[in-house]
Image (cartoon, rainbow, N blue to C red):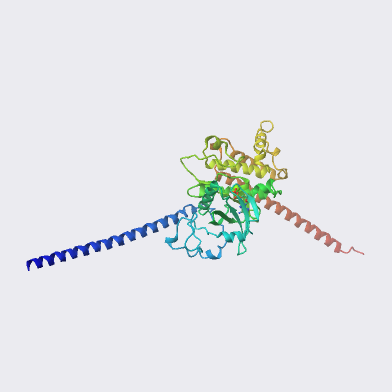
Amino acid sequence: MVDRTKLAAVVAAAAVGAAAVAAALVFLAIWLRRKRGSVAAGRTRSLESSTATLRAGNGNGSVDSSVSVSVSESGADWAHNPLPAGKRVAFWGWRGADHHAPLSVSGIPKYHYKDLQKATNNFTMILGQGSFGPVYKAVMATGEVVAVKALASDSSQGEREFQTEVILLSRLHHRNLVNLVGYCVEKGQHILIYEFMSNGNLASLLYGDNKRSLTWQERLQIAHDVSHGIEYLHEGAVPPVIHRDLKSANILLDHSMRAKVADFGLSKEEVFDGSKSGLKGTYGYMDPDYITTNKFTKKSDVYSFGIILFELITAINPQQGLMEYIDLAAIGGEGKVDWDEILDKNLLEGSIAEEVRVLADVAYRCINRSPKKRPWISEVSQAISRLRQRQMTLQRSETRTVLRRIEHQHVELSDLAGMRDITPVGA
Ligand SMILES: Nc1ncnc2c1ncn2[C@@H]1O[C@H](COP(=O)(O)OP(=O)(O)O)[C@@H](O)[C@H]1O
Ligand SMILES: [Mg+2]
């Protein structure tokens, strides 16, 4: 009897123990599940927040709302109905289970290769050729025109540049930076899609296939636009971005000749410890100090912009002796700078000549051999703004003078007509 009671007690204790272990296991399982969920959510959050870091702009910062390219049918809802957190993963080369879902951690719409093939007429409408690969014109199903940059498939440098452009351009938004409106990673292809800039690049307008004589107002507007684009990169973006390949072939013009900075393949967020990387950039635009020290800074971008300013006022290609001409003009006659020798002859007429010389002085300060002596980009853009202001005031006063002259002539004509109407006495 005693034994039976003992046995029952042992069995009951064992059952309670087993129940306690089972309960503990259930709790453990629930805890693990929750923990995994919160890690995933945290990861998603950090990816999302990383796309927003550079949005803090200066007063000039704005998303260019003039261009909106809709996503291929499959992706039309992407902007409004983002995928559930679990579906957001790194996008390089990833294809989700749902082939119709455009995935993008960058928030930039993802396109299907076949849609781009159709839009570009099987990649036949070439707009330009860069180091990255050809750029094609594309007409999307919606009728919108875009530019499509296809990476040469065998280029690992190109692939790095592709990633840099998507990551940077998804964060940088300014009216003077070319807008990235989509991308495609499919079938081993890496493709970038931009807003279409119908007037092409500045180099070809100044001395290339598209050459035409630009007015002083147009050149000043271009200088102003570009300086604002760079000012946003250097002083508006957080952290600041150094472009590293500023040149006239990377300045694009839209239908109304407004300029935007393009091609961010070599760009980098500013590294304050001045860490070094291989020598990159374009001959004719590279800061000599960078060539000797291998340290690229904001002042190296200012140097390249100085060269672009000289291109605007001389229409001479930096790869065809521009620097030699500048050096000669800087020595000038009687120890004085003489820019008139190298300025575009169309700019030496009338009241604008003085302004052109002022811009040449600004450009010359930008290309000072000592980076410390170069101005910051905000100082350059202020100087250009003052020139534009002066130009506009001058234009207004010229218009007033012309109007006054017309008015005067009108009065004289009316007087004459009045005299004719007077019938001579005795006639
Ligand atoms: N958005 C665009 N609209 C019109 N033409 C463009 C556009 N993007 C590039 N291009 C043309 O293609 C050329 C090369 O483009 P770019 O972005 O500089 O490529 P890469 O990185 O290969 O140098 C430009 O100089 C320009 O003529
Ligand atoms: Mg380029």
Find the residue positioned furthest to the top: 334
| Residue 2, placed above or below residue 335 | below
In this rendering, the count of numbered labels is: 0
User: Is residue 313 in sight in this rendering?
Assistant: yes
Between 288 and 56, the one nearer to me in the picture = 288
Can residue 385 be seen from the camera position used here? no
Instruction: Indicate the quadrant where residue 245 lies.
Output: top right
Q: Going 62% across and 44% down the picture, which residue do you hit?
A: 308
Q: Residue furthest left?
A: 2
| Residue nearer the viewer, 302 or 411 | 302
Q: Nearer the viewer, residue 368 or 334?
A: 368
Indicate left or right for 134 with 414 as reference. left
* Residue 426: x %, y % from top left: 92, 64
**Residue 422 at what x, y percent from top left?**
86, 63
390 horizontally vs 174: left or right: right
Q: Nearer the viewer, residue 219 or 260?
A: 260
| Image position, residue 414 (x, y; %) | 80, 61
Residue found 24% across the figure and 63% down from its top:
22
Q: Which image quarter holds the C terminus?
A: bottom right
- Could you tell whether 73 is left or right of 49 in the image? right
Of the 4 image quadrants, the one containing the N terminus is bottom left
Task: List x then y, in percent, for residue 394.
Answer: 67, 49
Tell me if residue 288 comes above or below residue 180 in the rendering.
above
Residue at the bottom extreme of this rendering: 1
